[in-house]
Amino acid sequence: MSFFDIVKLIFPLLIISLMLYGLLLFVKKYSFKRGGKSLQNIKVLSNQMIMPKKFLSVVRVKDKLLILGISENNINLLKEINAEESDMMEETNAAHNQGFADLFRKYINK
């Protein structure tokens, strides 16, 4: 095998590798921009594991807070808190620095 034969084998491999890398960069840059601003309206504020594969989550959707029970096979809405209650909850959390469990107990019993 001559040097020219080795270059003929490596050059196409290098070109294909560069094309795949370029495709990867393109997909990473543009794949999550389809939703636009709508994706910013949903934010997970807190997760608390109760048991293995079972969680409580607080999710903000626009101006509402949703308390969700999440298991391996289900997602259940436990409580929906409107904007007024969520503002009051944020003030309470900032003032008292309470944890997730304390806030959850307070607002789930209303």
Image (cartoon, grey):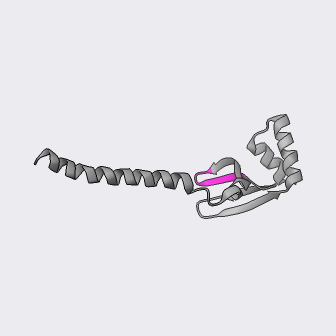
Magenta-tinted stretch: 51-58
Q: How many numbered marks, from 0 up?
A: 0
Q: Residue at x 65, y 53 (%)?
A: 55
Q: Residue at x 86, y 47 (%)?
A: 87
Q: Residue at x 82, y 37 (%)?
A: 94
Q: Position of residue 96 (x, y in %)?
A: 83, 35
**103 relative to 38 in the view: left or right:** right
Q: Main secondary structure of the magenta part?
A: strand
Q: Viewer-proximal residue, 61 or 98?
A: 61
**62 relative to 12 in the view: left or right:** right
Q: Position of residue 53 (x, y in %)?
A: 58, 54
| Magenta residue check for 21 | no
Task: Spot the residue most to the left.
Answer: 1
**43 relative to 85 in the view: left or right:** left
Q: Residue at x 41, y 50 (%)?
A: 21
Q: Viewer-proximal residue, 55 or 44?
A: 44
Q: Position of residue 88 (x, y in %)?
A: 88, 46
Q: Position of residue 29 (x, y in %)?
A: 54, 51
